[in-house]
């Protein structure tokens, strides 16, 4: 079992619905569906190009997946999650954009958001005592020799390279897209997510996702309101 703290929109939010349709999976319900041809892509190609974000569920990472430390259990993690969510205030990302990150496409903020950075930083710190040390296999999977000194230090200290000053919030929509297909993919995503591009995104809750076995789909364990503004939402 691995746990991860992610930001995602509520189960009934139009962005959640659009992303579930695009990826063919809903992390709140665990339901999956076959993708259909769209734009310049056939169903098989879209299925392959969205395989990674489909498994992880639509989200933006705050604390990357981790198994529990030997001295901790899920009850303790959930109690800490309750207290943390109660302390944090909701906020708004002023504008989201469709952006290409290398060969990947994602929804990202168009400008720095201090509240988002602070939430990410504190999530990493607060739940670090619950994280088991990286196994040799997991450490190698991150290809540490290809990382910068800062990123490798973050991996050793926090279990993930892209934290604190290296944090870049993104809600992934594809896996790596071949260069010759990137223009077509951008056009398709601009059409599908037009309702959300150039618009603000309210951050009102924090999600705990779980992966029950390595390689299994991630699902929402629970979604807690920031600041205790409403009841716990369970998947």
Image: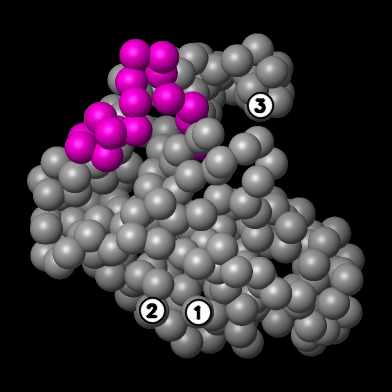
Residue 178 at least partly seen: yes
Task: Report crowding for label 1: few under 14, some 14 to 19, many 20 or more residues within 10 A (C-alpha).
Answer: some
Element at badge 1?
helix
Q: Earlier in the sequence, mark 3 or mark 1?
A: 1
Please report whichever mark, 3 or 2, sits nearer to the chain's N-terminal start.
2
- 76 magenta-colored: yes
Across and down, in percent, residue 55 comes to: 65, 54
Boundaries of the magenta span:
64-80
State yes or no: residue 67 in magenta.
yes
Residue 46, relative to residue 152: is it above or below? below
Give the left or right position of residue 208, taking residue 189 as reference: left
Could one spot residue 166 in this view of the protein?
no
Give the numbered dot on residue 17: 1
- Helix, strand or loop status at disc 3: loop
In this rendered view, identify the residue nearer to me: 62 or 205.
205
Neighbours of disc 2 within 10 Å: few (<14), some (14-19), many (20+): few
Image quadrant of residue 196? Answer: bottom left
Q: In this figure, which residue is indicated by the disc labeled 3?
A: 142
User: Marks 1 and 2: CB-CB under 8 Å?
Assistant: yes
**Residue pictured at 11% horizontal, 65% vertical:** 229
Residue visible at 76% across and 54% down in the picture: 176
In the image, residue 172 sits, relative to residue 198, either above or below, namely: above
- In whole angstroms, how far apart are the C-alphas of marks 1 and 2? 6 Å
Q: Which residue is mark 2?
A: 13
- Between the residue at mark 3 and the residue at mark 1, the CA separation in whole angstroms equals 31 Å
């Amino acid at each position: 079992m691995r746990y991860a703290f992610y930001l995602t929109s509520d189960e009934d939010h139009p962005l959640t619905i659009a992303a579930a349709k695009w990826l063919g999976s809903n992390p709140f319900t665990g339901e999956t569906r076959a993708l259909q041809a769209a734009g310049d892509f056939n169903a098989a190609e879209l299925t392959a190009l969205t395989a990674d974000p489909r498994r992880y569920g639509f989200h933006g990472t705050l604390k990357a997946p981790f198994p529990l430390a030997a001295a901790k259990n899920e009850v303790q993690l959930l109690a800490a999650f309750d207290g943390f969510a109660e302390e944090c205030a909701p906020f708004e990302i002023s504008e989201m954009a469709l952006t290409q990150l290398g060969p990947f496409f994602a929804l990202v903020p168009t400008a720095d958001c201090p509240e988002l950075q602070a939430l990410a930083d504190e999530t990493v710190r607060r739940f670090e005592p619950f994280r088991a040390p990286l196994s040799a296999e997991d450490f190698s999977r991150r290809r540490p020799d290809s990382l910068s000194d800062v990123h490798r230090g973050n991996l050793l200290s926090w279990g993930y390279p892209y934290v604190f000053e290296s944090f870049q919030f993104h809600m992934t929509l594809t896996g790596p897209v071949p260069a010759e297909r990137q223009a077509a993919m951008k056009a398709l995503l601009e059409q599908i997510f037009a309702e959300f591009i150039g618009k603000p995104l309210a951050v009102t809750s924090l999600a705990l996702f779980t992966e029950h076995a390595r390689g299994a789909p991630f699902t929402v364990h629970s979604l807690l309101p920031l600041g205790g503004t409403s009841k716990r939402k369970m998947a």
